[in-house]
Amino acid sequence: GAVVSQHPSRVICKSGTSVKIECRSLDFQATTMFWYRQFPKQSLMLMATSNEGSKATYEQGVEKDKFLINHASLTLSTLTVTSAHPEDSSFYICGGASGGAIETQYFGPGTRLLVL
Amino acid sequence: DAKTTQPNSMESNEEEPVHLPCNHSTISGTDYIHWYRQLPSQGPEYVIHGLTSNVNNRMASLAIAEDRKSSTLILHRATLRDAAVYYCILRALNTGNQFYFGTGTSLTVIP
């Protein structure tokens, strides 16, 4: 299957600071990238969908000014958590899809964010 | 978005087949059925997907009911490495291809 990487794998930051998470598709071109977060013992929750070169579409209840998404190339998307607070501590996962009628998503290994 | 229903947990003995069920009674004609699994602190791993016909790959088989309102993921010989949370997801072609994860089934494999 296709490979997606995320960096960093884990990050600890102070409350009020911003954190950027990178998601890269290593062996395919991801025309669409998806960002999820997962709290302990819960399922993945879709946060936003981004198409290369376009503004991201956010799910209901997700603040677009707090979770900034950039998808400037077919192999890179970034999620920036601005002014992070302890309640933003979570496991953030990206998924990439190259498009097509029966395309599936390939997921990164996740980024563990801890806000102190 | 279409919903799926899965048992919260299942157990299987090692080297025995495992049948993981999923109900999706509100599925539409263009929804693909995808299965992923997730190990702790890792991203989901693709397992298999299908539309109407049963599907086989090196990891598993997918049996889809004739009315498409349910499906079953079949692991032919469970190993300890198959212990994970298995998610059954409907992929909506007409609304941006988003995946909405349900609660999944936590599979325990007993040695």
Image (spheres, coloured by chain):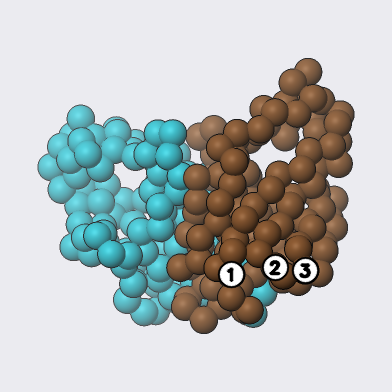
Chain colours: A cyan, B brown
Residue at (31% x, 51% y) in the render: A20
Circle 1 crowding by C-alpha within 10 Å: few under 14, some 14–19, many from 20: many
Output the chain of dot 2. B
- The amino acid pointed to by label 3 is Glu
Residue that badge 3 annotates: B66
Vertical side of B107 occupied by B72: above or below: below
Residue at (28% x, 55% y) in the render: A80
Q: Position of residue B38 (x, y in %)?
A: 59, 41
Residue B100's disc number: none
Q: What separation in Å lies between label 2 and label 3 (alpha carbons)?
A: 5 Å
The answer to whether mark 2 and mark 3 are in CB contact below 8 A is yes
Dot 1 or dot 3: first in sequence order is: 1
From where the camera sits, is residue A17 visible? no
Q: Are marks 1 and 3 on the same chain?
A: yes
Residue that badge 1 annotates: B27
- The amino acid pointed to by label 1 is Ile
Output the chain of dot 1. B
Q: What separation in Å lies between label 1 and label 3 (alpha carbons)?
A: 12 Å
Residue that badge 2 annotates: B68
Output the chain of dot 3. B
The answer to whether mark 2 and mark 1 are in CB contact below 8 A is yes
In terms of secondary structure, where does tag 2 sit? loop
In terms of secondary structure, where does tag 1 sit? loop
Residue B107, quarter of picture: top right
Q: Quadrant of the C terminus of chain A?
A: top left
Q: Residue furthest left?
A: A16
Going by the image, does B43 lie left or right of A11?
A: right
